[in-house]
Amino acid sequence: MNTTQYSATPGDLGGRRILLVEDEEMIASVVRGYLAQAGFLVDIAADGFTALHLAKTHSPDLIILDRMLPGLDGAEVCRRIRETMDTPIILLTALATEDDRILGLEMGADDYVTKPFSPRELVLRVKSVMRRSIKEFSPEPPVELAGFALNPSARIITSDGRPLVLTVREFDLLAFFLRRPHQVFSREQLIRGVWGWDFGDLSTVTVHVRRVREKIERDPTKPELLKTVWGVGYRFDAGVADPSTAAASAPDVS
Ligand code: CA
């Protein structure tokens, strides 16, 4: 097995700290091995309360969180972490049902991996999510549009001067649209452009669009900014009333 392609090089992601929350010792041990080989420092918590404690005391750069845990379950741990921290979270879900995945994303997870999973795939996901969360990896220029100000190096978006509280992927999604106003993107294009996946569950996009709308729209059920273009995808309208584009918009159904 060739593992060198998964190694983090110094100056890349090596030395970053990951909190692995997993009650099954065998899985925790295997995953830790792969992550350590990729250059990450790994702390393990075997239950939800320990996870919350270590998340506060160890300041991990990313958290891998098993959904099914004794005591406090993974979804609740995720929710509580999100109350105070925007640390990227990858949820490990045992059940491949859509409800389960969507619940995880609704709770504020940035990504999920379905069990049983390939540890190498998990390491790739970790790197992908972590790169997006690291400030130095955002060399793009700032954007000001429709009352929003995007500061990529600080990873902050303000709306009328007020900073929005966004998870890693919510930030990426809104930043993507702020750079490309008045253009329609399909969910497939967004999965590739925002998540960097060549495959993936399109409901991931739907959930994140909904979450972003809840943070930027006056009435999230009647979006005026991040609009659904029926049968095509989504478009960010930068507050310019244009009857021709307005007429092309269908009532929001997602
Ligand atoms: Ca478990």
Image (spheres, rainbow, N blue to C red):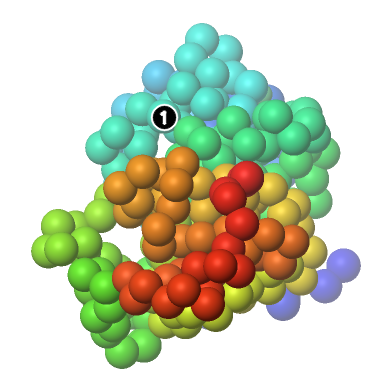
Image quarter where the N terminus lies is bottom right
Q: Residue furthest top?
A: 71
Which residue is outermost to the right?
A: 1
Disc 1 residue: CB within 8 Å of ligand 1:
no
Residue under the image location 24 percent in, 80 percent down: 144
Q: Nearer the viewer, residue 182 or 67?
A: 182
Left or right of residue 47: residue 237: left
**Residue 234: percent from left, percent from top:** 58, 65
- The total number of labels drawn is 1
Is disc 1 placed on a helix, strand or loop?
Answer: helix
Vertical side of 171 occupied by 140: above or below: below
Spot occupied by residue 249 in the image (x, y as percentages of width and height): 58, 63
69 or 253, nearer to the observer:
253
* Residue situated in front as seen by the camera: 203 or 65: 203
Q: Residue at x 36, y 88 (%)?
A: 139
Q: Is residue 178 left or right of residue 72?
A: left
**Dot 1, how many residues are within 10 Å of its Cα: few (below 14), some (14-19), or many (20+)?**
some
Q: Position of residue 187 (x, y in %)?
A: 68, 63
Q: Is residue 230 visible?
A: yes
Does residue 172 appear in the picture of this structure?
no
Going by the numbered disc 1, the residue's amino acid type is Arg
* Residue receiving disc 1: 79
**Residue at the spot 50% in from the left edge and 68% down from the top edge:** 246
Can you tell me which quadrant of the image ligand 1 is in?
A: top right
Q: Is residue 2 left or right of residue 251?
A: right
Q: Is residue 117 above or below residue 224?
A: above
Q: Is residue 49 above or below residue 202?
A: above
On the image, the x and y values in percent for residue 59 come to 30, 47
Residue 174, quarter of picture: bottom left
